[in-house]
Amino acid sequence: MSINLPQLRTRARQYRITKNLPTGGVVLFWRDQAYGWKNCLRDPQHECPGALAVDADGRAYQAIGGNERDGAQRWQEVAA
């Protein structure tokens, strides 16, 4: 799966503005769609493997391991 980080960061900023979200936390993406926000990166087991999270500083993380039924095992930072 190829991740376009500049585009993902832009979309995360737009989502924050559209939803009037706080500056911190992470914007969550699944199957190329922004779907939510959390105040911090946590609970990978609540996300499907492959989900993405972008924090306010533009760092991106991907949920890896696990399965769709039981959720991911951990978050891993996506290399720039």
Image (cartoon, helix red, strand yellow):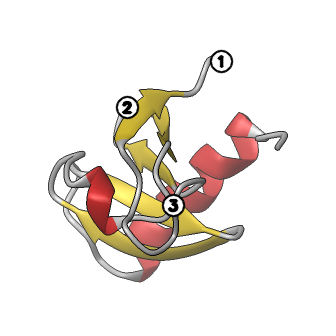
> Does label 1 or label 3 sit earlier along the sequence?
3
Label 2 residue SS: loop
Total residue callouts: 3
Local packing at callout 1 (Cα closer than 10 Å; few below 14, some 14-19, many 20+) is few
- Compared with 79, 19 (above or below) is below
- Marks 2 and 1 in Cβ contact (< 8 Å): no
Marks 2/3: CA distance? 28 Å
Q: Is residue 4 left or right of residue 12?
A: right
Quadrant location of the N terminus in the rendered image:
top right
Q: Amino acid at mark 3?
A: Asn
Please say whether residue 59 is visible from this viewpoint.
no
Closer mark to the observer between disc 2 and disc 3: 3
- Compared with 63, 21 (above or below) is below
Q: Position of residue 56 (x, y in %)?
A: 34, 42
Q: Position of residue 34 (x, y in %)?
A: 54, 72
Q: Is residue 2 left or right of residue 55?
A: right
Q: Amino acid at mark 1?
A: Ala
Q: Which residue is mark 2?
A: 57
Q: Which residue is mark 3?
A: 67
**The residue positioned farthest toward the top in the image shown:** 79
Q: Residue at x 65, y 49 (%)?
A: 8
> Does label 2 or label 3 sit earlier along the sequence?
2
- Front residue of this view, candidates 29 and 58: 29
Q: Which residue is mark 1?
A: 80
